[in-house]
Amino acid sequence: MSAKQDRRDKIASRAVQVGFLVALMGFWYFATAYWGVNRLLLPNPLNVWQELKDVLGSGEYLPDLKVTLTEVAVAFAISCSTGVTLGYLISRSQFLIKVFEPLLAGFYSVPIILFLPLYVLFFGLGEGSKIALGTTISFFPIVLNTIAGFGYVDRIFITAARSMGASDVQMFRYVLLPAAFPVILTGLRIGFTVTLLSILGSETLASLAGLGHKIVHLAEAMETARMFAYIAFVVVIAAFLNSVVSSVERRANRR
Amino acid sequence: MNRPLHLQKVLYRHPGLARLAVVVALFLLWEISARWWIDPSFLSPPSRVVASFGELFETPGIPKALQITFWELAVAFAISVAAGLPIGLAVGLSRFSNRSLMPIILLLYGTPQVTILPLFILYFGIGPPSKIAFGVSHGIFPIIVTIVAGVQNIKPILMTAAHSMGASRWQIFRWVIFPHMIPTFFAGMRLGMTGVLLGVLLAELYVSSAGIGYFTQLFTQAFDPTKLLGLVSVLAAMAIVMNEIVRRAEVHFGRWRTD
Amino acid sequence: MTAGDAAIRIRDVSHEFGEPGDAQFVLALSHTSLDIERGELLCLIGPSGCGKSTLLNMIGGLLTPTTGNVEVHGKPVRAPLPRDIAFVFQENALFPWCTIIENVKLGMVFQGVPKSEQEPRARKALEAVGLKDFMGHYPAQLSGGMRQRAALARALSLETGTLLMDEPFGALDEQTRMILGEDLSVLLSRSEKTIVFVTHSLGEAVFLADRVAVFSARPGRIKEIIEIDEPHPRSPSFVTTEKFSRLRNTLYGLLHDEIRKAVEQSATAVPQP
């Protein structure tokens, strides 16, 4: 394929993407403005825009945002510290890897969302149950990636470092850590994404505060336009946080 | 002094045995702490959970609720595969559609869908249709994305070889792309199953009038950890079995890759 | 050699990648003409990027020349001619999801061989390369050398007049390629096939070829053609003869400067993104 054709292809595919978004918005607008779709089911996009401006302008979202972000931060901090520490300790012995890795991977295949009712029973409807769920869900990708990172460093690097007389500390600092770092970082990124998702999810399912709770509350009050505004807000926040985490990962890997 | 050393050697040679020992130890810890340390209205020991399985299944509505959940999972999975496969093929096999549509699919896949769970209930009601729809919305994207990736990572030399031997377009699809894709397809189905389980269970736990979500809420409010743990274990077992079926199929059809 | 005898006739063939003026533009092969006789084994040897594989792919119809044309048995080549030409590639080009015998049969399926003929022809070809005990294995279960034997069996079973081999032993270790080369010489001496064989190995070229075409560095041209007048099948002791060393040294002399030139070219070339 020539470069010229390639460029034309790129423009055409951009056009399809823009066309898709425009058609979607157009369809939404016409459906609500002219085709008589119930406003309680699907609000007018202009209404949603008004509501969004109101939400952002009034700062009404701040308490819920604070609750959600605090839960995410606490859960992620706990799962990072425990996941990386445990993963490192397990990775020090091939025997422990053989024992624990399949166990952890098997446990991870159970939908952990099922723990939510138990956590609500143990910790109540408040922040405790959200943090517990977020920690449980993100613990697994972090610990598994840490094991994979430290446990499967190519023997040749270790042999080479030993042959040059590296001490244990030097081995960790110059061989194990740099070799494992990208894999662990991937685990942390996945862990962050699922923490965010599970916190939002558990707030939606059973909670007293937080952005997920706010959306449910608006849905029950049938304030659909405002709910759409909040959904848009949450989607943008989630996309922003995830892209920050991804770019941190990319930048760290570029070194 | 001699015995523990011997035991150590046995465990070392059989990590599976050691794994089993870890699981047993965890259950023992759970049993002991639930019996003597923790308030019985929060946690009950595994022995009691198992003993009350019979009682759980006799609770009016429970068998029906499990049946409904199972059915929702099956239908959502079937729809995800039936729709995800052709979409994945259509997007993956053409350079142009891949370039133009893939970013849209990844965008949808990347949004936290749980925030629009209330919308699903608003549109599809609190019965099975909303659970199925939410399950599909979680299951279909991993299937599409995996199939697109699978169709594309065929080694070019294999296409060249088939081409050099005079294979027609259909023959290339039938003998090269299709068999190449089968393991990927099962990998996609496995991820799809994980997604469907998450979606359906999320929707069930969110709101439900006769499904398992209703009962988890009931048992939570009644501080009945025995039945709650029993129900959760049954659901976890259901999830494990469904995951395992797809995983076995994946291994079986991907034999040529590993042996 | 009279022109009418040529099985493959290459006339003024060039090949360019990209468009002139582009940063990625490459003139891989420049105005090359060559006749290859029926039943001859011709080796193409030259530095990396000299266009020898490009030429092979143009003979096989996998690439279209920018200028000039290629004829096989008097027919112009515009697309693959699976009835006349079979390929053996450098990489492992067996389908990993098919067993060895299924792989061999699949070539015949593509070529349109009747079903009843496929099985006996596949068995015969696999026996010829010494793989009859491994017909039911998957490629991943075999060593690299055995996989290349299977790829050769697949090409032989197609019963084409011409065989194009693109560094078929390139990915194998020295000892395996030595044995495979000896077996290939025996195998091919019994057939009437016209063979074009791309290689990097001087020894392999001298051992196998009737003629060796030495390419210059990019833009590739045929610098010289060396005749190896030693009857087939060649015995392993040919390698130890004074004649073998003399021919090998001649090739080395011809190639050495070109390889240096090619290495310097690639060092100054724009790095690929």
Image (cartoon, rainbow, N blue to C red):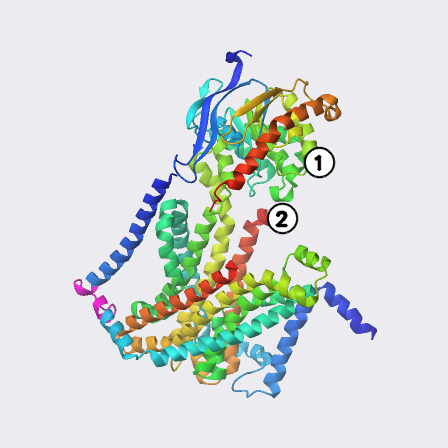
The answer to whether residue B48 is above or below residue C250 is: below
Q: Is mark 2 on a helix, strand or loop?
A: loop
Query: Residue under mark 1: which chain is it in?
Result: C
In three-dimensional space, the C-alpha distance between marks 1 and 2, rounded to whole angstroms, equals 25 Å
Residue tagged 1: C175
Name the residue nearer the viewer: C208 or B61.
C208
Q: Quick one: quadrant of the N terminus of chain A? A: top left
Q: Which amino acid does label 2 sit on?
A: Asp
Task: Give how far across and how far down residue A8 sits, in percent.
Answer: 32, 44
Name the residue nearer the viewer: A45 or B84.
A45
Q: Is residue B198 magenta?
A: no
**Crowding at mark 2 (Cα within 10 Å: few <14, some 14-19, many 20+):** few
Task: Kindly identify which numbered label has been placed on residue A43.
Answer: none
Q: What stretch is highlighted in magenta?
A: A32-47
Q: Which amino acid does label 1 sit on?
A: Gln
Q: Is residue A33 magenta?
A: yes
Residue tagged 2: B259
User: Can I make out residue C81 in this image?
Assistant: no
Task: Give how far across and how far down residue B100 sits, in percent.
Answer: 35, 50
Q: Quadrant of residue C97?
A: top right
Q: What element carries label 1?
A: helix
